[in-house]
Amino acid sequence: MIHEMDLNRAFKYASKFIFDSEIGDMHDYETYLKEAVVGKFVESIFSGDRLFVTSDQYVTNSDNIMNCSCVENSSMLVNCRYIAYSYASRNSEYVFGATSSGDSSWTIRCFYNNRLQRCFECCASVSVQDCYFCYNIRNCHDCLFTFNTSSKNYSIANISLEKNRYFDLKKKLMQEMLVLLERDKKLNFSVLNLEGIV
C-alpha cells in the first residue's frame, strides 16, 4: 500500500532526524511502538475480527480520524499526518508510538505531552525540543534523563553541562541506544519505568 510506504519512509526520516541515523523499518518496531498506545487488541465476540480497544473506542486499524493523512494503527487524531501507533493526538506530524500528544513533530514513544519537537521517550512535558527520556519538563531543550524541572538546557540527569560537553556525552549515549534499537528493535526500559537505569 502506498500509505505504508509513505509511513515507513516517514518513520525512517523521523528516526534520522531524532537519532541522526535511521533505525530501520517501522514495522520492525511494531510491538515496541504499540506498547505506547493506551488500549489493547481483542477479538470481537460478534464478528471474530481483531479489534483495538481504547477507552470505549473500537478500531481495527484507525478510527476517529479527522483531517489527517498517512495514518496507521491509531485512534482519535485531528489535523495530523504521518502518524502510526498513536492515540489522541492533534496538530502533529511524524509521530510514532504516542499517547495524548498535541502540536508535536518528530517524536517516537512520547506520552501526555504538548509542543514537542525531535523527542524520544518524553512524558508529561510541554514546549521541549531535542529531549530524550525526560519527564515533567517545561520550556527545555537538549536534555537527557531530566525530570521535574523547567527552563533547562544541555542537561543530563538534571545537571546542566557546558554545551560541547553535553553534545559529546549525548553522542556516546545515542550510539549505545542505536545499537540496542537496531539489534533488539526496542529498548527494555522507558521513561515510564526507569527503575535501576538512572
Image (tube, rainbow, N blue to C red):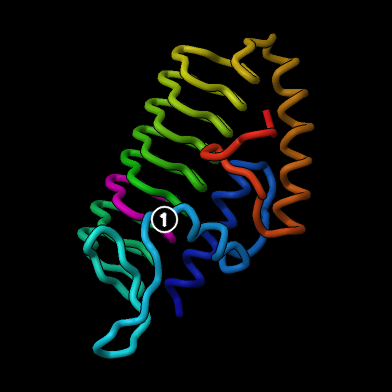
Point 53% across, 29% down: residue: 134
Q: Closer to the camera, 188 or 75?
A: 188
Q: Secondary structure at mark 1?
A: loop
Q: Position of residue 163 (x, y in %)?
A: 67, 13
Q: Magenta part mainly helix, strand or loop?
A: strand
Point 57% across, 53% down: residue: 13
Q: Position of residue 33 (x, y in %)?
A: 52, 57
In the rendered structure, the answer to whether residue 45 lies left or right of residue 163 reads left
Residue for badge 1: 37
**Residue at the extreme bottom of the image, as rendered:** 47
Q: Position of residue 17 (x, y in %)?
A: 58, 43
Q: Position of residue 80 (x, y in %)?
A: 31, 53
Point 35% across, 62% down: residue: 74
Quadrant where the N terminus sits is bottom left
Q: Relative to 168, say whether 74 is above or below.
A: below
In the rendered structure, the answer to whether residue 131 lies left or right of residue 149 reads right
> Residue 3 magenta-drawn?
no
Point 46% across, 42% down: residue: 110
The type of residue carrying mark 1 is Val
Which segment is the magenta one?
84-93
Q: Quadrant of residue 136?
A: top left
Quadrant where the C terminus sits is top right
Q: Quadrant of residue 40?
A: bottom left
> Residue 88 magenta-drawn?
yes
* Mark 1, other Cα within 10 Å: few <14 / some 14–19 / many ≥20: many
